[in-house]
Image (cartoon, grey):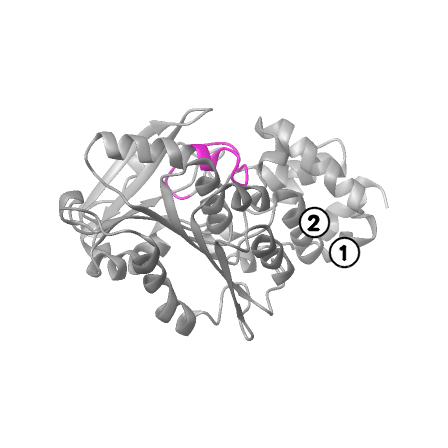
Amino acid sequence: MRLRGWLGMLGWLTIATVTGHPSQGDKLFVSLTEQLKNAKDLVGALAAGVVTAPNAQIPMGEAQDAGEEELRRQGVDKQLRLELGEPRVSLSVWLIGPPAAESKGTLFLLPGICSFKECMAGRARSYAKAGYRCVLPDFRGQGRSSGAFMTYGACEARDLRELLDLLLKQGEVRGPIGVYGMSYGAACGIQFAGLDPRVQAVVARSAFASMRQVVPVYARLFLPFLRPVLTDALIQQAVDRAGTLGGFDPNQSDTVAAIGRTQAAVLLIHGEKDRNIPIAQAEQLHAAAPDHSQLIRVPEGTHDQGFREVEGNKTLKWFQTHLPVAIR
């Protein structure tokens, strides 16, 4: 079928089930109907859909910051907006928990793709009660942060390293440093650890192995009527073109390589019924770092559901065990 022939079939498409957040979940493979109208071929449409950020056409700055009432409701101690990264973006960040000098250390809490830091506020409040200072950033182009493209960790890991530099310089946080991430955030968190040895412990729920491995799964899962033409070669061409469009090397978005580089203790939590990111990708991650990672398989876990009991018992204990106590 010719490219334009797919347009009628794409009109009904929504991808809100990807993240469970319909306000931005449908931005993954961003509006393929629009992409196909503008692209010259299917590869170009897929490439644009894979990397175009939800906020690509939306100005993000102080005017979009949360108001005082919302900050109080979410238990936010401080709201920051920082210019960082390459290309430069305006990053929206919340801090929750005791002041740096009174904390046991710092935890970065990273949300899933096309999601936002508000989803992490409840978890942050729980970790704050245990004495940790929590950093909740919106990734570039997502939530309340500016940016045109999502890079599956290639730029996000560098953003997190620079964010840590700035927060330490400003006295807002102190070590030791840990990371909790979900899905996209889990993979970016491991890549952050692979880039920055200051990260000493990571909890990664439903992490993907690499951009090159996760995009084919999502494409075939959420574009079932395109499966006959979604060959491995075509999808990898789309990933290559996505990197060109977003100005990054897709081969750098490699979580398996990152977990092999880091010396951080990494707890991998993954559902055996995850269709979005099959557990085989978590197995790859664990196999790449058997000496400093642990994989917890959740038999009834999907991509987003079934983790409450495991996480309630394991994640805080992981940080308490693998982060040294800060000296006051």
Image location (x, y in percent) of residue 209? 60, 49
> Residue at horizontal 52%, vertical 46%?
259
Task: Tell whether 281 sits left or right of 236.
Answer: left
Task: Tell whether 217 sits left or right of 207.
Answer: right
> Residue at horizontal 58%, vertical 34%?
252
- Above or below, 211 against 270 in this view is above
- Above or below, 90 against 94 in this view is above
Q: Nearer the viewer, mark 2 or mark 1?
A: 2
Residue 175 painted magenta = no
**303 and 197: which one is in front?**
197
Q: Which residue lies furthest to the right in this view?
A: 1
Q: Residue 225 carries which label?
A: 1
Image location (x, y in percent) of residue 285? 58, 53
The residue that mark 2 highlights is 216
Query: Is residue 81 in view?
Result: yes
Residue type at mark 2: give it.
Answer: Pro
